[in-house]
Amino acid sequence: MASRCWPRPPPLLRGPARVTRRPGPAPADAHHRNRQGILWMVLAMTAFMGNDALVKAVGARVPAAQLIVVRGVVAITLILLVARHLGVLGQVRSLWHRGVLVRAGCEGVATFMYLAALFHLPLANVTAINLSSPLLVALLARLVLGEAVHLGRWLAIGLGFAGVLLVVQPQPGQFNMHAWLAVLATLLYSARDLLTRGLPPALPSILVTLATAGTVWGMACVVLAVQGPVAMAWRDVGLLALASVFLSTGYFAVIAATRHAELSVVAPFRYVGLLWALLLGWVFWGDVPNLLAQAGMLCLVVAGLAMVWQQRRR
């Protein structure tokens, strides 16, 4: 009986093939991986902002834990279907790898810390703290992974962070216990990115995505069991189903970016998320940025272009 033949999936979806280690990657190969990583990170931030916009629309009517549970059911279902199509569900036992479990734990705990901060602080303050992650990631990549973070990269990262502060204009007097929760969440997100680089090369990225979504969903189930659910309109269920598509895409794309490129290169492109936030706020909620915010947007664009230019020169 002839077996059904499926098209062979792209390498990033299957997870990198196991190859013989060489003394070091060729400069051209590293350059290509960094460019791919930049594109994956831009896609991740775009997808996350699509998720955030939909969640914002539903969040006024549905508690956070219930929102995460409903969204997670659809997201996990989609991820399982993709993993089954790719033929990698047989490797699901490999998710018991210590690095995968610790990474998923960091993601889950950071998510709830971030939400706790978001519910008690202005969005501007939480955003400013969270977008300090490129600085932390670059520092950890230098100290732990030994990545060469050149002066040009530090300048681009610093310019991007300055742009973030100009855009969100946080109020220093509101830095309290909940702000420290946001700081801890940012540290955990940075550790998550660092752990991603240490995962086994043969482990498919889609399974790492599954572990991430499953952990966050499981934690939300525990919180929802304590709080109790509320009735939901079918329209909100539909919006959360769409949000789950964006969320799953963002999870996978950020994993692909941090596995296949230098962290200090892709980290600054997290700032793309803030540009999307400004655009969505202007289109849907009529939020017009002031002159300081416009200057910050310019800093973000220049920082991103500077990083791309440095990659093209190498």
Image (cartoon, helix red, strand yellow):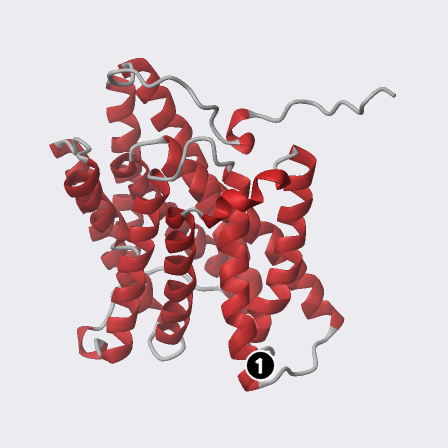
Q: Position of residue 64 (x, y in %)?
A: 52, 74
The kind of residue on which mark 1 rests is Ala
Count of number-bearing discs: 1
Note whether 13 is above or below 233 in the view shown. Answer: above
Note whether 34 is above or below 176 in the view shown. Answer: above
Compared across the picture, whether 158 is left or right of 110 comes to left
Q: Is residue 304 visible?
A: yes
**On the image, which quarter does residue 123 sit in?**
bottom left
Q: Is residue 294 visible?
A: no
Does dot 1 land on a helix, a strand or a loop? helix
Note whether 163 is above or below 63 in the view shown. Answer: above
Q: Position of residue 283 (x, y in %)?
A: 52, 57
The residue wearing badge 1 is 225
Q: Position of residue 154 (x, y in %)?
A: 16, 39
Q: Quadrant of the C terminus?
A: top left
Q: Quadrant of the N terminus?
A: top right
Q: Position of residue 137 (x, y in %)?
A: 25, 46
Nearer to us in this view, 213 or 127: 213
Compared across the picture, whether 155 is left or right of 120 comes to left
Compared across the picture, whether 182 is left or right of 220 comes to left
Residue placed at 49% from the left, 54% from the top?
212
Nearer to us in this view, 74 or 41: 74
**Residue lying farthest left?**
151
Residue placed at 66% from the left, 58% from the top?
74
**On the image, which quarter does residue 189 sit in?**
bottom left
Residue placed at 66% from the left, 49% from the top?
78
